[in-house]
């Protein structure tokens, strides 16, 4: 189905979302139409943030907003869906558009499999009527679904369109870029070199894939790395939990800007704990690159100042390899909680692979190596 027709049927002039690869035609269309004009389209920090924005829009206008997300973000909407939107509380209607990663019977990455299995069940438990949109779904069928949904929406209930892979299409091509020059893979290679025998907790997406391939290219094992293949935004908290229990080992957290923004409160918790053996590196390309490259708000955030305000003992921002190597060396020799932002270009190798070990194998190898110290 053409995304333009889908948007026309939804009939909303406000969208808040966290980008998803299955919904790339949708957010490309929204960026082409609205850009990131906050009156009409906000790419939010996390999915719960989207729900709250949508609620504010409805309270101010009386109209029905749209929230788009990958199904991995369903967990983030459950609290505000149950305690804010529900007709048993405020009765605020929202149209959810949810990308169905890990759909049963469709091959996907390990972190999406269970989420895919429970996607529809979670909506049922939350009393959200839903319709699945596939490649064969027609515009008339979407219009019919919206007609049925209008009664629910008028009662203050939310509804959902669960979108299968390839269901939405568009001829529009949007190219995302920034003014940075450093490539993420060369940044990660520098971190690997600087970290030596230390341990790395790596965020989800292409960063973990590149870290895995760098270890492979060096002929190394993967026992020093924990690849957070799902659970976006939680790598820094995982790293904190390890650092506190292994104070004699240096722990590096390799984070992304979208992930850091998603659960930014973690930085306050880390800053309060002040583990001197933790180095938190945010690779900032101002984009949700792993799902298509849509922009984050990280281009306007002063991450080092945020880190210092949260209690980190050292913070720096770099945009060249020379400066990166210098600050990595300084942080490694330091005994204070450190934060490093690295400005990064958007882009990755076309032949970038995926980890060939399972998450369980990664966990076992990491725990075994960590237990040796």
Image (cartoon, helix red, strand yellow):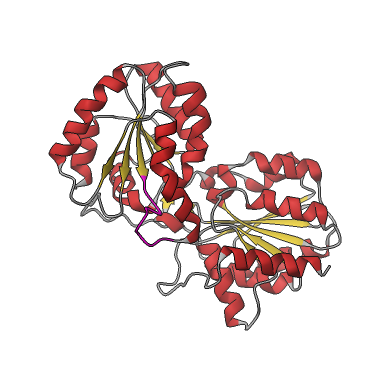
Quadrant of the image containing the C terminus: bottom right
Q: Is residue 97 above or below residue 250?
A: above
Residue 144: % across, % down: 17, 32
Q: Is residue 26 left or right of residue 87?
A: left
The residue closer to the viewer here, 348 or 361, is: 361
The residue closer to the viewer here, 136 or 336, is: 136
Q: Is residue 159 magenta?
A: no
Does residue 68 appear anywhere in the picture? yes
Q: Main secondary structure of the magenta part?
A: loop
The residue closer to the viewer here, 121 or 210, is: 121
Magenta part of the chain:
99-108
Quadrant of the rendered structure where residue 50 is? Answer: top left
Residue 211: % across, % down: 58, 69
Q: Is residue 162 above or below residue 328?
A: above
Image point (34%, 28%), residue name: 65
Q: What residue occupies the far bottom of the structure in this picture? A: 219
The residue closer to the viewer here, 8 or 326, is: 8
Q: What residue occupies the far left of the structure in this picture? A: 140
Q: Is residue 100 magenta?
A: yes
Image point (62%, 48%), residue name: 234
Residue 162: % across, % down: 32, 42
Quadrant of the rendered structure where residue 122 is? Answer: top left
Q: Is residue 351 left or right of residue 248?
A: left
Q: Is residue 199 above or below residue 293?
A: below
Q: Is residue 239 left or right of residue 245?
A: left
Does residue 320 appear anywhere in the picture? no
Q: Is residue 273 left or right of residue 343?
A: right
């Amino acid at each position: 189905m053409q995304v333009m027709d889908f948007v026309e049927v939804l009939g909303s002039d406000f969208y808040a979302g966290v980008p998803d690869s299955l919904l790339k035609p949708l957010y490309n269309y929204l960026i082409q139409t609205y850009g990131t004009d906050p009156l009409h389209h906000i790419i939010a920090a996390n999915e719960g943030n989207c729900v709250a924005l949508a609620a504010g829009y409805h309270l101010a206008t009386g109209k029905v907003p749209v929230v788009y997300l990958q199904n991995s973000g369903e967990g983030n909407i459950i609290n505000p869906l149950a305690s804010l939107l529900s007709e048993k509380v405020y009765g605020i209607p929202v149209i959810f558009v949810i990308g169905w990663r890990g759909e049963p019977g469709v091959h996907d990455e390990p972190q999406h499999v269970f989420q895919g299995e429970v996607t529809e069940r979670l909506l049922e438990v939350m009393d959200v009527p839903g319709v699945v949109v596939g490649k064969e779904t027609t515009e008339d069928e979407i219009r019919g679904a919206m007609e049925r949904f209008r009664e629910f929406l008028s009662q203050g209930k939310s509804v959902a369109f669960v979108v299968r892979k390839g269901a939405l299409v568009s001829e529009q091509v949007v190219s995302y870029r920034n003014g940075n020059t450093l490539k993420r893979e060369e940044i990660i290679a520098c971190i690997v070199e600087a970290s030596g025998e230390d341990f790395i907790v790596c965020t989800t997406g292409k960063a973990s894939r590149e870290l895995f391939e760098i270890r492979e290219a060096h002929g190394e094992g993967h026992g020093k790395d924990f690849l957070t293949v799902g659970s976006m935004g939680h790598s820094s908290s995982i790293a904190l939990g390890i650092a506190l229990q292994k104070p004699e080992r240096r722990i590096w957290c390799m984070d992304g800007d979208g992930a850091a923004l998603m659960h930014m409160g973690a930085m306050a918790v880390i800053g309060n704990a002040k583990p001197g053996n933790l180095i938190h590196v945010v690779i900032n390309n101002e984009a949700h690159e792993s799902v298509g490259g849509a922009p984050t708000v990280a281009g306007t955030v002063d991450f080092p100042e945020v880190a210092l305000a949260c209690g980190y003992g050292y913070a720096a921002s770099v945009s060249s390899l020379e400066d990166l190597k210098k600050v990595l060396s300084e942080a490694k020799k330091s005994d204070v909680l450190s934060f490093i932002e690295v400005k990064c270009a958007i882009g990755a190798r076309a032949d970038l692979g995926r980890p060939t070990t399972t998450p369980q194998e990664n966990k076992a190898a990491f725990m075994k190596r960590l237990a040796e110290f």
